[in-house]
Amino acid sequence: MPTNYFIFSTGGDWDSTTLYNNGDEYLADQLYLELQSGRDDYGNLSKGGLTRGGQMTAFVSPQGSNGSQVGIFPGKIEMQFPVHKVTIENETPTFLIEFTKVLLDDEDVTAQVTDLLVNIDAVNNDVQAYVMMYKPHFLSSDEVATINLI
């Protein structure tokens, strides 16, 4: 099964936003990724990120497809926002979440990421993008950091 290699880039407005797959421009109405991980047995945020398992929804809706969805994985997606870069990779044919790797600004944050949402919806003019990370501390209280990507 061939894998996808998506590259999304935006300068913060629609005119500067592009999406490519395997080197070809990919015209899409929507790019959607939602990841939840790093939860304890009670659903509370905890350390470990994707090492604790999780779930992800990741698709693109091709332009003019009336909302049909094409899966992003197996493959890799690089998303370049005005200040941050996020890369998510999972090459397993059945998308085993524990083999997902997440990079933020080229730093591996797989074990810290708890939530990630990227919703670039051109049809509804809706744009959301953030990542949340759990940062445990030895001598002080742990913290959860939310990084707005756009």
Image (cartoon, helix red, strand yellow):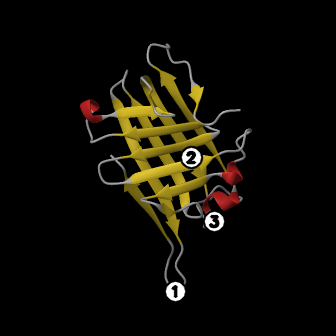
Circles 2 and 3: CB atoms closer than 8 Å: no
Query: In the rendering, at what x and y percent does residue 138 appear?
Result: 55, 83
Q: Specify whether 149 is left or right of 13.
A: right
Q: State which tag comes first along the sequence, 2 or 1.
A: 2
Q: Residue at x 50, y 37 (%)?
A: 6
In the rendered structure, find residue 48 and report the number of the disc placed on it.
3
Q: Earlier in the sequence, mark 1 or mark 3?
A: 3
| Label 2 Cα neighbours within 10 Å, binned few <14 / some 14-19 / many ≥20 | some
Q: Nearer the viewer, mark 2 or mark 1?
A: 2
Amino acid at pointer 3 = Gly
Using the numbered discs, state the Cα–Cα distance from disc 2 to disc 3 in whole angstroms.
14 Å
The three-letter amino acid code for the residue at tag 2 is Leu
Q: Earlier in the sequence, mark 2 or mark 3?
A: 2
Other residues around mark 3 within 10 Å, as few (<14) / some (14–19) / many (≥20)? many
Q: Give the quarter of the image for residue 17.
A: top left
What is the CA distance from the residue labelled 1 to the residue labelled 3?
18 Å
**Which residue is the site of mark 2?**
35
Residue farthest along the front direction in this orientation? 23
**Which amino acid type is shown beneath numbered disc 1?**
Leu
- Picture coordinates of residue 142, whole percent (x, y): 51, 73
Q: Which mark is residue 139?
A: 1
